[in-house]
Image (spheres, helix red, strand yellow):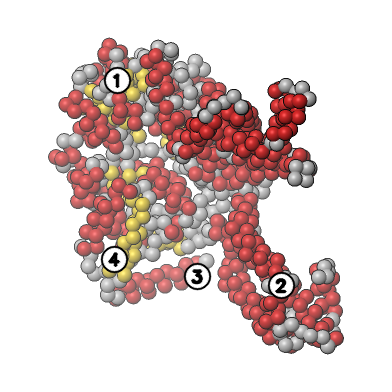
């Protein structure tokens, strides 16, 4: 298929002598109908009419307010007869933003259809002039099952991705540039564009928000590294220990560790959270044993609370890594070890030259996923400490809060959507930069064919 | 714009005339309430409909508890209930979003029927925004009669002395802005809103510092115990001899303590060498009418019915909620309830909870700091607390 420059294509269509092609600019499908593709032309025309109706009756109502996100809030007017303040509906900034995004997306889609219409018009005119065969509608459809089968297959996923992923993301990103917070809630009060005010707040302007952002970001990264690599290393050691020739009852040991997974994560997290309270089971037990006289501040001392979340995360995470590594270990060819042993390599040498490189090679992509997952590890933090202990020097956050749990609090408790959205964008940037740059450097990607 | 409004008004009047002429109008109303209250709400709504056969009523019920009302409303005001109940601390955000109809019909009768505190809690900026439903969203003290005498419970020092003598604990959730405020409010500090809706908080004043010193002394007392309500419910009668909480655990505490069950107003505490009565928040649940409703007048009638004297008495009988209606609150059944009597005794020292969201997290952080026996400079902590609470 020829890949023409769209602008050149449009210019060529405008310059053609065929009246029907030129008419297709304003009445879609004219050329198709003239040259016998009646159904195709009618569909183009229908698309145009539908779009015009959509735009005039729905889209424009919102899009024309896009610049201000609404001018009049809901009004109240005294109704003497009913003895109430009747409400006169006003603009709703959120709906204006949401449906403007939708309208723009529909318009872009329509322009694509319009472009296809022009391209098709030129082609059909050319074919007619050369006296060649012009596809009927049935033949056009059948190409969708043959040479254009990729379009048939991919259109549904592309459409759903656009509707349910791309559009909401655009909407969320736009919120970061508004002042949508608890004091600007439609329909009573409208919100509007504030440019980069939120970004400036996070980084410079607002001392306490900036301090909170960098404090929480620092802990998020420390947490992600600790949570990922404690699980990675200890899970690997555990798998090697269980897999060792001298260990009997391998299946029993594995099952023991798997029991931790059998209990739903949130149940064990909530139970542990209770047990660690100042009058929880652990403190009471320690006190009755006489080991401590006052309860240990597991949840109230920042350093201890951070240690606790890392330890508890190990408890619920190691069984998973152990399972992964057991599988990988069993896949390492036994003859590698045998020949190494014959060459005089000891157990340490064998581990560092055979086992470790093999495991790192296979598991690095999965580890990157885990790392990114830990940056956004909502469950462990929120269910265990809820971000606590809260700190007076942080803005609505605690000392174990990750960016993602802070974001949750800002949205759900404070209705501070604009700030939350700004932080969301930064999380996305951090996560995507980290994972893409590391992923492309991994052996598994660069030397993909090596272990095949 | 003026022209538009007048045309709209004309249309409304016309609609009103037509409405008057039509027989048996179909009125669909959506009502929100907590899971536990669903049966009661249904019963009351059906009784309301039965008394008004001139219209055909269709109710739909949604399970949205008072605590979630604001969040769920703001998600989509048009999909929210026409009539819903909310705690008074959500009134500010709801009014800012223009979510609530002003109470303009029968205004004076409603104000007269309900306690002044509950009417004040439903009022913001001088306008009544809802129908008071309960007046029990406050706290007071439960105690074990076998450990503490009526004289002991008058002062915090007396309670702590008796508790230490008996080797028991005194429970209060200091790391919670709602409870910790009682020291500051008792010592004359202000936590309120100015006319522009900004938070005023002077907890870092000399009076606030004196209150904070009292909190620190309390937290450092061997008898002090903190935690959440489950801890109090589990421990009272055993290791705990007194605890501060609200009516929602009254049944559980009564069961634990049996004949030793008692409740009273909060004690006094020592601030700057003098005995000062602890303050509190006087919380209410309020029924509001959504400004997006298609039937404002009917929704208001329903809200008024749901909060009327008969409905409040029924709510007390079925759910044990303390009435805001004066007649209902002074009925013999309600005044025989020890917890509600203690709450009523405390309510004269209570203020309406007109507090913005920004207060709660720093207040919790402040309480947690003292619970952890921090030796940090109190004035510095209070300055941070006030700066965070009043930040814009």
Above or below, B314 against A388 in this view is below
What residue sits right under mark 1 in the picture?
B239
Q: Which residue is mark 3?
A: B3
Badge 2: how crowded within 10 Å, few (<14), some, or many (20+)?
A: few
Q: Residues within 10 Å of mark 3 (few under 14, many from 20)?
A: few
Disc 2 marks which residue?
Answer: A146
Out of A305 and B129, give the one closest to the viewer.
A305
Rendering coords of residue A336 (x, y %): 74, 33
Image height of A67 relative to B195, above or below: below
Q: Residue at x 79, y 85 (%)?
A: A133
Q: Is residue A152 left or right of residue B4?
A: right
**Residue that label 4 marks:** B57
Task: Residue at the far left: name it.
Answer: B332
- Using the rendered view, name the quadrant where residue B105 is placed: bottom left
Whether labels 3 and 2 belong to a single chain: the reply is no
Q: Earlier in the sequence, mark 4 or mark 3?
A: 3
């Amino acid at each position: 298929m020829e890949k023409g420059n769209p602008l050149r294509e449009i210019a060529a269509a405008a310059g053609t002598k065929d009246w029907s092609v030129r008419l297709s600019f304003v009445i879609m499908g004219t050329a198709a109908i003239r040259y016998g593709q009646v159904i195709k032309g009618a569909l183009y025309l229908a698309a145009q009419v539908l779009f015009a109706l959509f735009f005039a009756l729905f889209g424009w109502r919102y899009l024309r307010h896009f610049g201000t996100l609404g001018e009049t809030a809901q009004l109240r007017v005294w109704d003497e007869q009913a003895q109430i303040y009747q409400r006169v509906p006003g603009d709703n900034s959120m709906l204006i933003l949401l449906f403007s995004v939708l309208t723009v997306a529909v318009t872009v889609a329509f322009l694509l259809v319009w472009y296809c219409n022009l391209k098709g018009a030129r082609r059909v005119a050319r074919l007619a002039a050369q006296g060649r065969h012009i596809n009927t509608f049935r033949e056009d459809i059948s190409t969708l099952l043959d040479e254009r089968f990729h379009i048939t297959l991919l259109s549904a996923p592309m459409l759903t991705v656009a509707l349910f992923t791309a559009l909401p993301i655009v909407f969320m990103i736009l919120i970061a540039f508004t002042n949508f917070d608890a004091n600007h809630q439609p329909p009573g009060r409208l919100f509007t564009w504030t440019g980069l005010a939120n970004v400036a707040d996070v980084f410079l302007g607002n001392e306490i928000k900036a301090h909170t952002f960098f404090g929480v970001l620092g802990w998020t990264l420390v947490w992600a590294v600790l949570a990922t690599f404690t699980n990675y290393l200890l899970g690997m050691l555990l798998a090697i220990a269980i897999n060792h020739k001298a260990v009997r009852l391998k299946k029993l040991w594995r099952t023991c560790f798997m029991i931790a997974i059998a209990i739903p994560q949130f149940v064990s997290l909530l139970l542990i959270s209770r047990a660690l309270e100042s009058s929880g089971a652990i403190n009471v037990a320690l006190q009755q044993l006489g080991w401590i006289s006052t309860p240990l501040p597991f949840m109230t001392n920042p350093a201890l609370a951070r240690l606790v979340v890392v330890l508890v995360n190990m408890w619920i995470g190691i069984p998973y890594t152990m399972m992964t590594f057991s599988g990988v270990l069993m896949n390492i060819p036994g003859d590698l070890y045998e020949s190494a042993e014959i060459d005089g390599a000891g157990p340490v040498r064998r581990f560092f030259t055979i086992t470790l490189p093999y495991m790192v090679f296979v598991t690095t992509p999965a580890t990157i996923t885990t790392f990114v997952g830990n940056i956004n590890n909502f469950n462990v933090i929120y269910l265990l400490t809820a971000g606590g202990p809260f700190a007076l020097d942080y803005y609505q956050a605690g000392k174990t809060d990750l960016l993602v749990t802070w974001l949750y609090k800002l949205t759900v408790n404070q209705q501070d959507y604009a700030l939350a959205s700004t932080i969301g964008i930064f999380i996305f940037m951090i996560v995507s930069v980290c994972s893409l740059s590391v992923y492309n450097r991994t052996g598994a990607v660069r030397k993909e064919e090596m272990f095949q | 714009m003026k022209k538009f409004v007048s045309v709209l008004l004309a249309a409304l009047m016309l609609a009103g005339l037509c409405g008057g002429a039509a027989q048996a109008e179909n009125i669909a109303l959506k009502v929100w309430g907590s899971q536990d209250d669903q049966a009661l709400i249904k019963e009351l709504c059906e009784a309301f409909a039965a008394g008004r056969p001139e219209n055909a009523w269709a109710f739909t019920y949604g399970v949205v508890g008072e605590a979630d009302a604001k969040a769920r409303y703001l998600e989509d005001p048009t999909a929210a209930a026409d009539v819903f109940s909310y705690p008074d601390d959500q009134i500010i955000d709801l009014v800012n979003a223009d979510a609530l109809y002003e109470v303009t019909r029968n205004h004076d009768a409603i104000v007269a029927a309900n306690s002044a505190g509950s009417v004040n809690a439903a009022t913001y900026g001088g306008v009544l925004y809802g129908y008071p439903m309960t007046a029990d969203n406050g706290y007071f003290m439960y105690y074990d009669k076998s450990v503490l005498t009526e004289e002991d419970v008058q002062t915090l020092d007396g309670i702590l002395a008796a508790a230490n003598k008996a080797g028991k604990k005194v429970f209060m959730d200091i790391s919670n802005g709602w409870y910790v405020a009682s020291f500051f409010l008792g010592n004359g500090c202000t936590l309120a809103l100015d006319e522009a809706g900004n938070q005023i908080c002077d907890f870092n004043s000399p009076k606030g510092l004196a209150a904070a010193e009292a909190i620190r002394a309390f937290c450092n007392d061997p008898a002090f115990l903190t935690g959440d309500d489950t801890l109090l419910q589990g421990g009272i009668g055993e290791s705990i001899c007194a605890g501060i909480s609200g009516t929602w655990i009254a049944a559980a505490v009564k069961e634990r303590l049996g004949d030793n069950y008692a409740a009273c107003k909060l004690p006094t505490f020592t601030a700057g060498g003098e005995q000062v009565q602890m303050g509190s928040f006087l919380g209410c649940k309020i029924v509001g009418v959504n400004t997006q409703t298609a039937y404002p007048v009917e929704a208001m009638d329903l809200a008024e019915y749901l909060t009327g004297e008969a409905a409040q008495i029924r709510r007390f009988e079925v759910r044990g909620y303390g009435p805001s209606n004066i007649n209902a609150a002074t009925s013999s059944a309600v005044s025989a309830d020890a917890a509600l009597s203690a709450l009523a005794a405390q309510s004269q020292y209570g203020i309406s909870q007109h507090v913005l969201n920004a207060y709660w997290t720093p207040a919790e952080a402040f309480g947690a700091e003292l619970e952890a026996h921090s030796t940090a400079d109190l004035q510095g902590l209070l300055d941070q607390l006030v700066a965070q609470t009043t930040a814009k």
